[in-house]
Amino acid sequence: MKQTYARKENVEEKGNNKDQASITNSLKSKTEAIKAGLLGLGTVGTGVYRIIEQHQEDLKHQTGCDIKVEKILIKSMDKERSVAISPELLTTDYGDILNDPNITIVIEVMGGIEEARTYIAKALQSKKNVITANKDLIALYGGELLTLASENGCDLFYEASVAGGIPILRALVEGFASDRITKMIGILNGTTNYMLTRMAKEKLEYDFCLKQAQELGYAEADPTSDVEGLDAARKLAILGTLGFHTDISLDEVKVKGISSVSQEDIQYGKELGYEMKLLGIADRRDEEIELSVQPTFVAKSHPLAHVNGVFNAVYVYGEAVGETMFYGPGAGELPTATAVVSDLVTVVKNLNLGVNGRGMVAPYREKKLKPENRIYRRYFIRLVVKDRSGMLADVTKAFADHNMSISKMIQKPLAGQQAELVTITHTISLKDLEAWVKNIESNRSEIKIVSYYAVEGEEN
Ligand SMILES: NC(=O)c1ccc[n+]([C@@H]2O[C@H](COP(=O)([O-])OP(=O)(O)OC[C@H]3O[C@@H](n4cnc5c(N)ncnc54)[C@H](OP(=O)(O)O)[C@@H]3O)[C@@H](O)[C@H]2O)c1
């Protein structure tokens, strides 16, 4: 997430305060409703509308004023809506929201990148506060838009962009404000977690589970962004930026998806005491940062091994607090809408206090990415070897030649004088692992690497 914050100074800041003060004054009294423009009335937009309508009393109690959706931008006027909406609320012209001075908050839940980016930028330039659920946009242009928000004295919040209904971003920014986060591990994509859970529990094949996820509406017709790990990588970039106070851009996250994970890999992992999960890991030790999304075997003793189905979870290690875990629904109409509306409550409270655009802590830490020779992990490695005497000693030596050693191993006979060796290594460096893979693939025809995956957590 490229950050290019510019804290506005003196003259401009005074100007912004004036603008903000005039917005606050325009609220006149706390009995006057605060008006929001909603961009999108799909899954999330419908949930946001429902919650604002149904929770008026609670929202008023928390903010001191009524909150009203004044206009809703949609694409098609003819579409049937699952919520009763007065037709005059709907528009296909963004100008109806942008040019309405009474609308002080724009909620972007339409998705997509370029149009959403333009609409949000225009809203901020018009001194309207913005809430978005758009992880694709924030992971790519979060820095640019946050700078714009800061320059215009506006809030830009995006709680729903990571892990849907789990209030993880506010927890990182506010709950951990006094601590120093050293590591975050997340199951950040419900679609892949649903697929891996079914593969593990029901011994179903990858293609079948993907088709089921598509039929249930968990996966898109083009599932690439989910199954190849990009969706999780976007969320990890947002988590890394907020948790480590450092500019993290998407291309700094190493990404590997689940499309090559096989049923056999998962069952061998289970036999050795692990569950397969697509993990996003952001690690900061010795001031060096490492970010990756990859299918990982998680020890059954680790709480993340038990996060199943479409659920998400984020495990956070703080120097002072130790270990904490946040768990919940990562998507869906109402869970995601609760995150959007919680941002709305914060914006309204800020409006009442006249402090919009001041809550953002710009990334201030220098970024040092960890080189591969200092990225240490354990690995699950599955090999097919020629079943002959001395072969095991050869494999062990090939490991030792690259500073690798075996912690656990199982051996299974195969047809045609071959055997399968499934190992869990001790902690090794990524650089050594990659050198070993290259050497085996180029020079050792009797040893075939079937798969290898990172391992997380200690087994009991
Ligand atoms: N769905 C989830 O569970 C979830 C979870 C977390 C985050 N998010 C994020 O929330 C955002 C919205 O997701 P969603 O699932 O609610 O999407 P969705 O169901 O496809 O709804 C999109 C809505 O935006 C409107 N829209 C799209 N493009 C538009 C345009 N160019 N001009 C005017 N209106 C436009 C559509 O209008 P019509 O109705 O007229 O077609 C529709 O109402 C996305 O950024 C997504 O990544 C979603």
Image (spheres, helix red, strand yellow):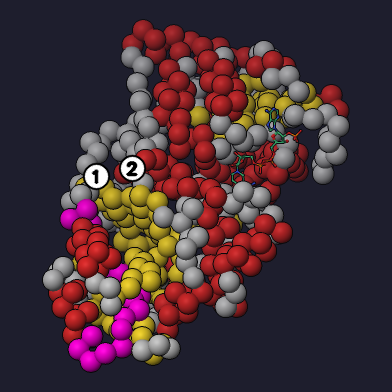
Question: Which residue, given by chain and number where applicable, does mark 1 sit on?
Answer: 369
- Provide the residue designation for mark 2: 252
Q: Residues within 10 Å of mark 2 (few under 14, many from 20)?
A: some
Q: In the picture provided, is 324 more to the left or to the right than 403?
A: right
Q: Which residues are magenta?
A: 372-392
Rendering quarter of residue 349 = top right
- Within 10 angstroms of label 1, few (less than 14), some, or many (20 or more) residues? some
Image quadrant of ligand 1 equals top right
Instruction: Classify mark 1: helix, strand or loop.
Output: loop
Q: Is residue 378 magenta?
A: yes
Task: Name the residue located 28 percent from the left edge and 77 percent from the top edge.
Answer: 446
Residue at figure coordinates x 26%, y 90% from the top left: 388
Which residue is rendered at x = 83% and y = 29% of the image? 77
> Which residue: 50% across, 60% down?
259
Please say if 332 is above or below 408.
above
Residue 225, above or below 315: above
Give the answer, above or below, for where 313 lies relative to 3.
below
Question: Which of the pair 378/285 is nearer the observer?
Answer: 378
Q: CA distance from mark 1 to mark 2?
A: 8 Å
